[in-house]
Image: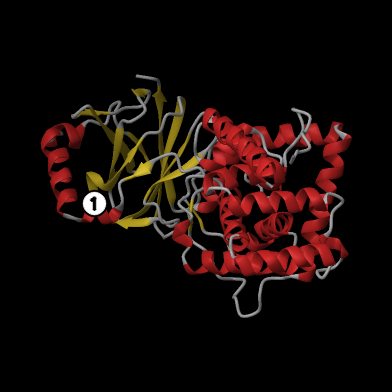
Amino acid sequence: MRNNSKLALIYQRCAPTVFRRARQILGSESDAREVTQDIFLSLLERPEQFGGHSSLTTFLYRMTTNACLSRLRNERNRQRLRRERIEGADGPEAHGPDLEQQLMVQRALQSMPPDLAQAAIYYLVDGLTHAEIAELLECSRRHVGDLLTRVQGWEETKEASS
Amino acid sequence: MVTRKDLPSACVSDLRFDRWHAEELEPAESRAVEAHVKDCARCQQRDQELRAAAEDFLQRHPLPAGIDPERRLALPSPRQRFSRWSVAWMSGALAVATAVVWLVVVPRAERSDDVSSATRLKGGARLAFFVKRDGRVLRGHDGFTVHPGDLLRFSVTTREPQHVAILSRDGRGIVSECYPGGGRSRKLAVSHDELLDSSVELDDTLGNEKIVAVFCDEAFEVAPLVARLGRDGTIEAEANCSLDSLEIRKTAR
Protein backbone atom coordinates (compact mmCIF):
# COMPACT_ATOMS: atom_id res chain seq x y z
CA MET A 1 0.00 0.00 0.00
CA ARG A 2 1.16 3.46 -0.69
CA ASN A 3 -0.09 6.39 1.24
CA ASN A 4 -1.22 8.25 -1.83
CA SER A 5 -2.59 11.17 0.12
CA LYS A 6 -2.93 14.70 -1.10
CA LEU A 7 -0.03 16.86 -0.09
CA ALA A 8 -2.40 19.28 1.59
CA LEU A 9 -3.65 16.55 3.91
CA ILE A 10 -0.16 15.36 4.81
CA TYR A 11 0.92 18.94 5.46
CA GLN A 12 -2.14 19.61 7.61
CA ARG A 13 -1.58 16.49 9.70
CA CYS A 14 2.19 16.56 10.05
CA ALA A 15 3.59 20.05 9.50
CA PRO A 16 2.46 21.40 12.89
CA THR A 17 4.37 18.58 14.57
CA VAL A 18 7.52 19.27 12.56
CA PHE A 19 7.28 22.97 13.34
CA ARG A 20 6.58 22.49 17.04
CA ARG A 21 9.52 20.14 17.53
CA ALA A 22 11.89 22.28 15.48
CA ARG A 23 10.95 25.27 17.61
CA GLN A 24 11.44 23.28 20.81
CA ILE A 25 14.89 22.14 19.69
CA LEU A 26 16.11 25.35 18.08
CA GLY A 27 14.19 27.85 20.16
CA SER A 28 13.57 30.00 17.12
CA GLU A 29 10.29 30.40 15.30
CA SER A 30 11.85 31.61 12.06
CA ASP A 31 14.36 28.75 11.99
CA ALA A 32 11.61 26.27 12.81
CA ARG A 33 9.58 27.60 9.91
CA GLU A 34 12.53 27.17 7.56
CA VAL A 35 13.14 23.63 8.79
CA THR A 36 9.47 22.80 8.24
CA GLN A 37 9.53 24.16 4.70
CA ASP A 38 12.79 22.40 3.91
CA ILE A 39 11.45 19.08 5.13
CA PHE A 40 8.24 19.26 3.14
CA LEU A 41 9.99 20.41 -0.01
CA SER A 42 12.44 17.54 0.40
CA LEU A 43 9.57 15.10 0.82
CA LEU A 44 7.90 16.56 -2.24
CA GLU A 45 11.03 16.15 -4.33
CA ARG A 46 11.97 12.71 -3.06
CA PRO A 47 8.98 10.93 -1.51
CA GLU A 48 10.88 7.64 -1.76
CA GLN A 49 13.12 8.71 1.14
CA PHE A 50 10.23 7.69 3.37
CA GLY A 51 10.82 3.97 3.21
CA GLY A 52 7.55 3.00 4.86
CA HIS A 53 9.28 1.12 7.67
CA SER A 54 7.65 3.32 10.27
CA SER A 55 4.75 5.72 10.48
CA LEU A 56 5.07 9.01 8.63
CA THR A 57 5.07 10.89 11.93
CA THR A 58 7.94 8.77 13.24
CA PHE A 59 9.86 9.35 10.04
CA LEU A 60 9.27 13.10 10.29
CA TYR A 61 10.43 13.09 13.92
CA ARG A 62 13.75 11.70 12.68
CA MET A 63 13.97 14.15 9.79
CA THR A 64 13.25 17.09 12.06
CA THR A 65 15.80 15.97 14.63
CA ASN A 66 18.51 15.62 12.00
CA ALA A 67 17.66 18.92 10.32
CA CYS A 68 17.79 20.73 13.65
CA LEU A 69 21.05 19.10 14.65
CA SER A 70 22.59 20.20 11.35
CA ARG A 71 21.57 23.77 12.10
CA LEU A 72 22.86 23.67 15.63
CA ARG A 73 26.22 22.38 14.46
CA ASN A 74 26.70 25.31 12.15
CA GLU A 75 28.76 27.82 14.14
CA ARG A 76 27.12 30.89 12.65
CA ASN A 77 23.61 29.51 13.23
CA ARG A 78 24.53 28.49 16.73
CA GLN A 79 25.70 31.95 17.73
CA ARG A 80 22.69 33.60 16.12
CA LEU A 81 20.27 31.20 17.81
CA ARG A 82 21.87 31.79 21.17
CA ARG A 83 21.70 35.55 20.66
CA GLU A 84 18.04 35.36 19.65
CA ARG A 85 17.16 33.22 22.63
CA ILE A 86 18.81 35.55 25.08
CA GLU A 87 17.81 38.83 23.52
CA GLY A 88 14.29 37.74 22.66
CA ALA A 89 14.77 38.72 19.03
CA ASP A 90 12.34 36.08 17.90
CA GLY A 91 9.43 37.16 20.01
CA PRO A 92 8.38 36.28 23.52
CA GLU A 93 6.60 33.12 22.42
CA ALA A 94 9.94 31.56 21.62
CA HIS A 95 10.91 31.76 25.27
CA GLY A 96 9.80 29.12 27.68
CA PRO A 97 10.28 29.19 31.41
CA ASP A 98 13.21 26.83 31.05
CA LEU A 99 15.42 29.03 28.90
CA GLU A 100 18.59 28.18 30.76
CA GLN A 101 17.87 24.49 30.55
CA GLN A 102 17.16 24.81 26.82
CA LEU A 103 20.42 26.64 26.25
CA MET A 104 22.25 23.92 28.13
CA VAL A 105 20.63 21.28 25.96
CA GLN A 106 21.59 23.20 22.83
CA ARG A 107 25.19 23.54 23.99
CA ALA A 108 25.35 19.83 24.70
CA LEU A 109 23.79 18.89 21.39
CA GLN A 110 26.31 20.93 19.45
CA SER A 111 29.25 18.92 20.67
CA MET A 112 27.82 15.44 21.14
CA PRO A 113 28.32 12.62 18.64
CA PRO A 114 25.21 12.36 16.43
CA ASP A 115 23.79 9.22 18.04
CA LEU A 116 24.05 10.72 21.52
CA ALA A 117 22.59 14.01 20.34
CA GLN A 118 19.59 12.28 18.78
CA ALA A 119 18.94 10.24 21.92
CA ALA A 120 19.31 13.36 24.05
CA ILE A 121 16.74 15.25 21.98
CA TYR A 122 14.18 12.48 22.19
CA TYR A 123 14.73 12.04 25.90
CA LEU A 124 15.33 15.56 27.16
CA VAL A 125 13.38 17.68 24.69
CA ASP A 126 10.56 15.36 23.64
CA GLY A 127 10.34 13.50 26.93
CA LEU A 128 9.90 10.14 25.21
CA THR A 129 10.19 6.72 26.80
CA HIS A 130 13.08 4.36 26.10
CA ALA A 131 10.75 2.22 23.99
CA GLU A 132 9.72 5.17 21.85
CA ILE A 133 13.33 6.29 21.45
CA ALA A 134 14.28 2.75 20.47
CA GLU A 135 11.62 2.86 17.75
CA LEU A 136 12.87 6.21 16.49
CA LEU A 137 16.51 5.17 16.50
CA GLU A 138 15.66 1.69 15.22
CA CYS A 139 17.66 0.02 17.95
CA SER A 140 17.04 -1.96 21.14
CA ARG A 141 15.86 -0.43 24.40
CA ARG A 142 19.07 -1.63 25.96
CA HIS A 143 21.07 0.38 23.45
CA VAL A 144 18.94 3.42 24.25
CA GLY A 145 19.81 2.93 27.92
CA ASP A 146 23.50 2.82 27.00
CA LEU A 147 23.19 5.97 24.89
CA LEU A 148 21.44 7.87 27.67
CA THR A 149 24.08 6.80 30.17
CA ARG A 150 26.67 8.18 27.79
CA VAL A 151 24.63 11.39 27.44
CA GLN A 152 24.73 11.75 31.21
CA GLY A 153 28.47 11.08 31.24
CA TRP A 154 28.99 13.58 28.45
CA GLU A 155 27.19 16.30 30.37
CA GLU A 156 29.16 15.60 33.53
CA THR A 157 32.47 15.67 31.66
CA LYS A 158 31.57 18.95 30.00
CA GLU A 159 30.48 20.48 33.28
CA ALA A 160 33.68 19.37 34.98
CA SER A 161 35.83 20.83 32.23
CA SER A 162 34.01 24.15 32.04
CA MET B 1 22.80 19.26 34.97
CA VAL B 2 20.10 18.88 32.36
CA THR B 3 16.97 17.19 33.64
CA ARG B 4 13.70 16.27 32.07
CA LYS B 5 10.14 16.32 33.25
CA ASP B 6 9.06 12.71 33.43
CA LEU B 7 5.50 11.83 32.54
CA PRO B 8 3.48 9.51 34.71
CA SER B 9 3.94 6.16 33.02
CA ALA B 10 0.34 5.86 31.87
CA CYS B 11 0.30 9.30 30.28
CA VAL B 12 0.45 9.95 26.58
CA SER B 13 3.74 11.19 25.14
CA ASP B 14 3.86 13.87 22.47
CA LEU B 15 4.86 11.24 19.92
CA ARG B 16 1.73 9.24 20.66
CA PHE B 17 -0.39 12.37 20.61
CA ASP B 18 1.10 13.32 17.26
CA ARG B 19 0.46 9.87 15.83
CA TRP B 20 -3.06 9.91 17.26
CA HIS B 21 -3.81 13.28 15.72
CA ALA B 22 -2.38 12.09 12.39
CA GLU B 23 -4.71 9.05 12.60
CA GLU B 24 -1.81 6.66 12.43
CA LEU B 25 -2.54 4.57 15.50
CA GLU B 26 -4.16 1.17 15.32
CA PRO B 27 -7.84 1.28 16.27
CA ALA B 28 -7.25 -0.40 19.65
CA GLU B 29 -4.38 1.91 20.52
CA SER B 30 -6.36 4.91 19.39
CA ARG B 31 -9.24 3.90 21.65
CA ALA B 32 -6.83 3.44 24.56
CA VAL B 33 -5.40 6.93 24.08
CA GLU B 34 -8.88 8.40 23.83
CA ALA B 35 -9.98 6.63 27.01
CA HIS B 36 -6.89 7.78 28.91
CA VAL B 37 -7.23 11.38 27.77
CA LYS B 38 -10.84 11.38 28.86
CA ASP B 39 -9.82 10.53 32.43
CA CYS B 40 -6.51 12.37 32.75
CA ALA B 41 -6.44 16.10 33.36
CA ARG B 42 -2.78 16.41 32.39
CA CYS B 43 -3.30 14.67 29.05
CA GLN B 44 -6.51 16.57 28.34
CA GLN B 45 -4.59 19.77 28.75
CA ARG B 46 -1.69 18.58 26.61
CA ASP B 47 -4.09 17.37 23.93
CA GLN B 48 -5.76 20.78 23.83
CA GLU B 49 -2.39 22.55 23.75
CA LEU B 50 -1.17 20.47 20.83
CA ARG B 51 -4.40 20.86 18.88
CA ALA B 52 -4.46 24.61 19.48
CA ALA B 53 -0.81 24.94 18.47
CA ALA B 54 -1.49 22.97 15.29
CA GLU B 55 -4.44 25.16 14.38
CA ASP B 56 -2.45 28.28 15.07
CA PHE B 57 0.44 27.05 12.93
CA LEU B 58 -1.81 26.15 9.99
CA GLN B 59 -3.53 29.51 10.12
CA ARG B 60 -0.24 31.38 10.13
CA HIS B 61 1.66 29.05 7.81
CA PRO B 62 -0.58 27.38 5.26
CA LEU B 63 0.95 25.21 2.57
CA PRO B 64 3.60 27.36 0.87
CA ALA B 65 2.43 29.17 -2.24
CA GLY B 66 3.40 27.52 -5.49
CA ILE B 67 2.80 23.99 -4.24
CA ASP B 68 -0.28 22.30 -5.61
CA PRO B 69 -2.32 21.17 -2.59
CA GLU B 70 -4.04 18.56 -4.76
CA ARG B 71 -0.75 16.96 -5.63
CA ARG B 72 -0.53 13.42 -4.36
CA LEU B 73 2.53 12.00 -2.70
CA ALA B 74 3.03 8.32 -3.35
CA LEU B 75 4.51 7.42 0.01
CA PRO B 76 5.11 3.80 0.91
CA SER B 77 2.79 2.39 3.50
CA PRO B 78 3.59 3.07 7.11
CA ARG B 79 4.65 0.06 9.10
CA GLN B 80 5.31 -2.01 5.99
CA ARG B 81 5.71 -5.47 7.33
CA PHE B 82 7.39 -7.09 4.38
CA SER B 83 10.84 -6.62 3.00
CA ARG B 84 9.86 -6.55 -0.61
CA TRP B 85 12.03 -7.87 -3.37
CA SER B 86 12.23 -4.76 -5.40
CA VAL B 87 10.80 -4.63 -8.86
CA ALA B 88 14.15 -3.42 -10.11
CA TRP B 89 15.82 -6.43 -8.61
CA MET B 90 13.19 -8.73 -10.02
CA SER B 91 13.55 -7.27 -13.48
CA GLY B 92 17.23 -8.12 -13.70
CA ALA B 93 18.95 -11.31 -14.63
CA LEU B 94 18.78 -12.52 -11.06
CA ALA B 95 15.04 -12.11 -11.12
CA VAL B 96 14.80 -14.21 -14.22
CA ALA B 97 16.90 -16.88 -12.56
CA THR B 98 14.72 -16.78 -9.47
CA ALA B 99 11.55 -17.04 -11.48
CA VAL B 100 12.95 -20.02 -13.31
CA VAL B 101 13.76 -21.72 -10.04
CA TRP B 102 10.26 -21.13 -8.78
CA LEU B 103 8.73 -22.47 -11.96
CA VAL B 104 10.99 -25.47 -12.01
CA VAL B 105 10.31 -26.49 -8.46
CA VAL B 106 6.56 -25.98 -8.69
CA PRO B 107 5.28 -28.59 -11.12
CA ARG B 108 2.99 -27.13 -13.74
CA ALA B 109 0.28 -29.67 -13.12
CA GLU B 110 0.25 -28.84 -9.44
CA ARG B 111 0.10 -25.14 -10.17
CA SER B 112 -2.69 -25.27 -12.68
CA ASP B 113 -5.53 -27.45 -11.53
CA ASP B 114 -5.59 -27.76 -7.80
CA VAL B 115 -8.50 -25.61 -6.75
CA SER B 116 -9.26 -27.50 -3.59
CA SER B 117 -7.45 -26.06 -0.63
CA ALA B 118 -4.75 -24.11 -2.31
CA THR B 119 -6.96 -21.72 -4.21
CA ARG B 120 -10.46 -20.47 -3.69
CA LEU B 121 -12.80 -19.40 -6.40
CA LYS B 122 -15.07 -16.40 -6.26
CA GLY B 123 -16.39 -14.53 -9.24
CA GLY B 124 -14.13 -16.49 -11.56
CA ALA B 125 -10.87 -15.15 -10.15
CA ARG B 126 -8.65 -17.07 -7.78
CA LEU B 127 -5.75 -16.39 -5.51
CA ALA B 128 -3.11 -18.91 -4.56
CA PHE B 129 0.35 -18.74 -3.09
CA PHE B 130 3.57 -20.60 -2.70
CA VAL B 131 5.97 -20.51 0.19
CA LYS B 132 9.72 -20.70 -0.17
CA ARG B 133 11.39 -21.92 3.00
CA ASP B 134 14.94 -23.16 3.48
CA GLY B 135 15.37 -23.61 -0.26
CA ARG B 136 12.15 -25.59 -0.66
CA VAL B 137 8.96 -24.40 -2.32
CA LEU B 138 5.68 -25.45 -0.73
CA ARG B 139 2.22 -24.90 -2.04
CA GLY B 140 0.20 -22.82 0.41
CA HIS B 141 -3.46 -23.17 1.23
CA ASP B 142 -6.10 -21.58 3.41
CA GLY B 143 -4.97 -22.04 7.03
CA PHE B 144 -1.40 -22.81 5.97
CA THR B 145 1.22 -22.32 8.69
CA VAL B 146 4.06 -20.00 7.81
CA HIS B 147 7.04 -18.67 9.72
CA PRO B 148 8.92 -15.38 9.88
CA GLY B 149 11.44 -15.23 7.07
CA ASP B 150 9.37 -17.37 4.71
CA LEU B 151 9.03 -15.96 1.22
CA LEU B 152 5.51 -15.77 -0.20
CA ARG B 153 4.76 -15.59 -3.86
CA PHE B 154 1.22 -15.24 -5.10
CA SER B 155 -0.39 -16.59 -8.22
CA VAL B 156 -3.75 -15.67 -9.70
CA THR B 157 -6.22 -17.19 -12.09
CA THR B 158 -8.54 -14.92 -14.04
CA ARG B 159 -10.95 -15.73 -16.84
CA GLU B 160 -10.61 -12.32 -18.40
CA PRO B 161 -8.16 -9.43 -18.09
CA GLN B 162 -8.49 -7.99 -14.59
CA HIS B 163 -7.06 -5.21 -12.47
CA VAL B 164 -5.63 -6.82 -9.38
CA ALA B 165 -4.38 -5.84 -5.94
CA ILE B 166 -3.56 -8.08 -2.98
CA LEU B 167 -3.75 -6.91 0.62
CA SER B 168 -2.98 -8.55 3.91
CA ARG B 169 -4.22 -7.84 7.43
CA ASP B 170 -2.41 -9.29 10.40
CA GLY B 171 -3.76 -10.11 13.85
CA ARG B 172 -3.01 -6.62 15.06
CA GLY B 173 -5.10 -5.16 12.28
CA ILE B 174 -2.17 -3.78 10.32
CA VAL B 175 -2.88 -3.81 6.62
CA SER B 176 -0.24 -3.96 3.91
CA GLU B 177 -0.40 -3.90 0.18
CA CYS B 178 1.34 -7.07 -0.96
CA TYR B 179 0.76 -6.52 -4.67
CA PRO B 180 1.45 -4.56 -6.83
CA GLY B 181 2.85 -2.05 -4.32
CA GLY B 182 2.19 1.20 -6.15
CA GLY B 183 -1.08 2.22 -4.54
CA ARG B 184 -3.02 1.34 -7.64
CA SER B 185 -4.17 -1.97 -9.07
CA ARG B 186 -2.23 -3.62 -11.87
CA LYS B 187 -3.84 -4.99 -14.99
CA LEU B 188 -3.18 -8.64 -15.69
CA ALA B 189 -4.00 -10.56 -18.83
CA VAL B 190 -6.04 -13.77 -18.67
CA SER B 191 -4.03 -15.83 -16.21
CA HIS B 192 -4.03 -19.44 -15.30
CA ASP B 193 -2.38 -19.81 -11.93
CA GLU B 194 0.18 -17.29 -13.08
CA LEU B 195 2.92 -16.41 -10.62
CA LEU B 196 3.08 -12.69 -9.94
CA ASP B 197 6.33 -10.88 -10.45
CA SER B 198 7.26 -10.09 -6.87
CA SER B 199 7.60 -11.91 -3.59
CA VAL B 200 7.34 -10.82 0.01
CA GLU B 201 9.37 -11.92 2.99
CA LEU B 202 7.27 -12.41 6.10
CA ASP B 203 8.16 -10.35 9.13
CA ASP B 204 8.17 -11.62 12.71
CA THR B 205 4.62 -10.62 13.66
CA LEU B 206 2.93 -13.84 14.72
CA GLY B 207 -0.74 -14.76 14.50
CA ASN B 208 -3.40 -15.18 11.87
CA GLU B 209 -3.15 -13.09 8.78
CA LYS B 210 -5.87 -12.52 6.23
CA ILE B 211 -4.93 -12.14 2.59
CA VAL B 212 -7.44 -10.61 0.20
CA ALA B 213 -7.13 -10.34 -3.56
CA VAL B 214 -9.32 -7.79 -5.29
CA PHE B 215 -10.13 -8.26 -8.97
CA CYS B 216 -11.93 -5.53 -10.92
CA ASP B 217 -12.79 -4.75 -14.50
CA GLU B 218 -11.46 -1.21 -14.08
CA ALA B 219 -8.33 0.16 -12.44
CA PHE B 220 -8.77 1.17 -8.79
CA GLU B 221 -6.98 2.89 -5.94
CA VAL B 222 -5.79 0.63 -3.17
CA ALA B 223 -5.77 3.12 -0.28
CA PRO B 224 -9.56 3.10 0.38
CA LEU B 225 -9.51 -0.69 0.51
CA VAL B 226 -6.57 -0.65 2.91
CA ALA B 227 -8.44 1.75 5.15
CA ARG B 228 -11.61 -0.32 5.05
CA LEU B 229 -9.81 -3.60 5.68
CA GLY B 230 -7.93 -2.04 8.57
CA ARG B 231 -11.05 -0.52 10.07
CA ASP B 232 -13.61 -3.28 9.51
CA GLY B 233 -11.45 -6.35 9.12
CA THR B 234 -13.20 -7.14 5.87
CA ILE B 235 -14.08 -5.59 2.54
CA GLU B 236 -17.05 -6.08 0.25
CA ALA B 237 -16.73 -6.54 -3.48
CA GLU B 238 -17.97 -3.50 -5.34
CA ALA B 239 -19.74 -3.58 -8.70
CA ASN B 240 -17.69 -5.25 -11.43
CA CYS B 241 -15.24 -6.57 -8.85
CA SER B 242 -14.72 -9.85 -7.08
CA LEU B 243 -12.71 -10.94 -4.09
CA ASP B 244 -10.81 -14.00 -3.09
CA SER B 245 -9.38 -14.36 0.37
CA LEU B 246 -7.54 -16.85 2.50
CA GLU B 247 -5.87 -16.94 5.86
CA ILE B 248 -2.41 -17.98 6.94
CA ARG B 249 -1.18 -18.75 10.45
CA LYS B 250 2.20 -17.33 11.30
CA THR B 251 4.01 -19.12 14.08
CA ALA B 252 7.58 -19.02 15.35
CA ARG B 253 9.97 -21.50 13.79
- Residue drawn at 59 percent across, 71 percent down: B70
Residue A20 showing in the rendered view: yes
Q: Which residue is most to the front?
A: A161
Mark 1: which secondary structure?
helix
- Foreground residue, A68 or B189? A68
Q: Position of residue B197 (x, y in %)?
A: 26, 49
Q: Which residue is most to the bottom?
A: B66
A1 to the left or right of A153: left
A39 to the left or right of B135: right
Relative to B180, is A28 above or below? below
- Foreground residue, B109 or A118? A118
Q: Which residue is mark 1?
A: B90
Relative to B9, is B60 above or below? below
Q: Position of residue A93 (x, y in %)?
A: 85, 62
The subunit letter for the residue under badge 1 reads B
The answer to which image quadrant residue B249 occupies is top left
The amino acid type, in three-letter code, at marker 1 is Met
Coloring basis for residues: secondary structure
Q: Position of residue A1 (x, y in %)?
A: 46, 50
- Foreground residue, B90 or B164? B90
For disc 1, the neighbor class at 10 Å (few under 14, some 14 to 19, many from 20) is some
- Residue drawn at 53 percent across, 42 percent down: A137
Residue A126 showing in the rendered view: no
Q: Position of residue A147 (x, y in %)?
A: 56, 36
